[in-house]
């Protein structure tokens, strides 16, 4: 019946209808081609990534739950130690000078430094970040080894935990290990990173073994790489001899010190004449 | 047969064909094409290609956020000022690092290492001031100095080099030296 109806339409009308239908068909064909191409070039590559991203997100969420629980169990004593000793509310000059006493003596006894000048305490000021700053100036004549050691000391002074001594790349490497292991291994990493730096340096093996036993043998290479990170190695080499005296003098944790200016001039016999200005940081009392 | 007669004869079949083609393509567009150009999720939703890309970007952003939160949890943050200062300390370069870097840059020139005489180095945060002289290369002292400065400028660890004045002077023993004072920012790796 429909065909009969169609047949009664004029030739012109039928032609127009044909042309319109053909044009729409061409448009639909082009749409098909575009959709298939878009899926192949855009959709499929992205779709292949989705399962991996979703799995990783789920893993991270599980790790977050465990890490949050572990964090809640921490006693908060580290925060207190930072407030009291690392960034103290007062100038704390006796403790500050005891620090310089200890490091100067250690370097002279090790033959890495020939002499140290008097230490000058500058005018205390508050910096742009609202920190209390005590500028400390002194000069020294020391060997390359002594210069390296002293600069390393200032880089590490004030750092409390293993985690703070590591750079981001090493921490990312450790966290990447946990993603190939059980989610609960993040708690072991967290515990290791929050270990007191001096305690770790005095006796690294128990902490490393504890971490090792939480991980599978497959993670051994990555773990060894992380434990051999330059900053951790430097901390071990510097503090292992200083540790006993830092404890007996009661100056651990160290005040946070940062080099402001270092001027180095080579002199005779492979020695260097060095002038330092070091900032000793503190808090403004609330 | 005239054109009009031909058209009269083919108009209806052509119309029926084009209508049928259009119908089939429309059916395909509505029912078949989505099966092949959508990602069907387990929850029953179907994502178009652009939506898949959007989903991928959202997941990547969420992952980044979770990684940052995880890092904050595993590192005992304690105090934001402490954290800032510790980060700043990690960026500071030591004389050993600056010296090793500068000597390596000079070594790449293929010159005798004794030609680079560093007399004074000052380090303030990332900013390095270095005084010294190029000696022992005869009349090429300024050339070697220029090559050294260029080598430093091209290093990814170095920014913002203040070029020295290029001069030469004759010492009492007849040797030629080119003194320099360089200022640059150094980011140790």
Image (cartoon, coloured by chain):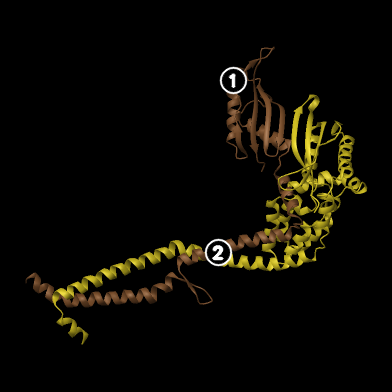
Q: Quadrant of residue B98?
A: top right
**Quarter containing the N terminus of chain B:** bottom left
Which chain appears brown? B
Which chain appears yellow? A
Left or right relative to A281: residue A177:
left
Left or right relative to B72: residue A13:
left
Asked whether the residues under the numbered discs 1 and 2 touch, taking CB atoms below 8 Å apart as contact, a structural biologist would say no
Sequence-wise, which precedes: disc 1 or disc 2?
Answer: 2
The numbered dot on residue B140 is: 1
* Residue B27 visible somewhere in the drawing: yes
Write down the residue under mark 2. Answer: B58
Q: Residues within 10 Å of mark 2 (few under 14, many from 20)?
A: few
The numbered dot on residue B75 is: none
Label 2: chain? Answer: B
Q: Residue furthest right?
A: A248
Q: Secondary structure at mark 2?
A: helix
Same chain shared by disc 1 and disc 2: yes
Viewer-proximal residue among A189 and A182: A189
Q: Quadrant of residue A133?
A: top right
Q: Residue at x 17, y 75 (%)?
A: A13
Q: Is B111 drawn above or below residue A70 in the view shown?
A: above
Label 1: chain? Answer: B
Q: Residue furthest front?
A: A286
């Amino acid at each position: 019946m429909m065909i009969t109806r169609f047949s009664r339409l004029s030739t012109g009308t039928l032609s127009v209808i044909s042309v319109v239908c053909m044009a729409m068909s061409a448009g639909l064909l082009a749409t098909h081609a575009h959709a298939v191409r878009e899926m192949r070039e855009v959709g499929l590559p992205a779709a292949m990534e989705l399962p991996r991203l979703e799995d990783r997100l789920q893993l991270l969420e599980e790790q977050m739950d465990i890490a949050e629980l572990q964090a809640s169990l921490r006693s908060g004593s580290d925060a207190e130690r930072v407030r009291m000793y690392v960034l103290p509310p007062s100038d704390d000059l006796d403790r500050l000078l005891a620090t310089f006493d200890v490091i100067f003596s250690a370097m002279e006894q090790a033959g890495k430094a020939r002499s140290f000048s008097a230490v000058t305490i500058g005018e205390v000021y508050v910096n742009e970040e609202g920190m209390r700053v005590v500028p400390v100036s002194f000069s020294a004549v020391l060997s390359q080894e002594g210069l390296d050691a002293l600069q390393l000391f200032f880089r590490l002074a004030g750092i409390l935990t293993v985690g703070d001594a590591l750079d981001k790349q090493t921490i990312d490497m450790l966290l990447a290990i946990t993603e190939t292991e059980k989610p609960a291994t993040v708690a072991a990493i967290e515990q290791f990173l929050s270990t007191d730096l001096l305690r770790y340096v005095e006796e690294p093996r128990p902490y490393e073994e504890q971490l090792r036993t939480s991980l599978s043998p497959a993670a051994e290479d990555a773990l060894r790489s992380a434990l051999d990170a330059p900053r951790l190695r430097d901390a071990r080499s510097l503090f292992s001899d200083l540790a006993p005296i830092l404890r007996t003098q009661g100056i651990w944790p160290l005040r946070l010190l940062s080099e402001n200016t270092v001027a180095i001039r080579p002199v005779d016999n492979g020695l260097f004449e060095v002038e330092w200005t070091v900032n000793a940081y503190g808090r403004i009392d609330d | 047969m005239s054109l009009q007669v031909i058209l009269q004869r083919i108009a209806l079949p052509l119309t029926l064909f084009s209508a049928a083609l259009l119908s089939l393509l429309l059916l395909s567009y509505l029912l078949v094409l989505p099966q092949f150009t959508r990602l069907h999720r387990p929850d029953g939703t179907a994502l178009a290609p652009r939506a898949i890309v959007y989903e991928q970007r959202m997941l990547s952003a969420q992952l980044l956020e979770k990684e940052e939160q995880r890092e904050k949890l595993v590192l005992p943050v304690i105090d934001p000022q402490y954290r800032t200062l510790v980060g700043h300390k990690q960026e500071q370069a030591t004389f050993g690092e600056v010296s090793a870097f500068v000597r390596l840059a000079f070594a790449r020139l293929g010159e005798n290492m004794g030609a680079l005489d560093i007399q004074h180095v000052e380090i303030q945060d990332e900013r390095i001031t270095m005084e010294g002289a190029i000696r022992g290369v005869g009349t090429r002292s300024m050339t070697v100095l220029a090559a050294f400065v260029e080598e430093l400028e091209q290093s990814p660890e170095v920014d913002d080099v203040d070029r020295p004045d290029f001069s030469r002077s004759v010492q009492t023993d007849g040797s030629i030296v080119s003194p320099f004072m360089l200022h640059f920012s150094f980011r140790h790796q």
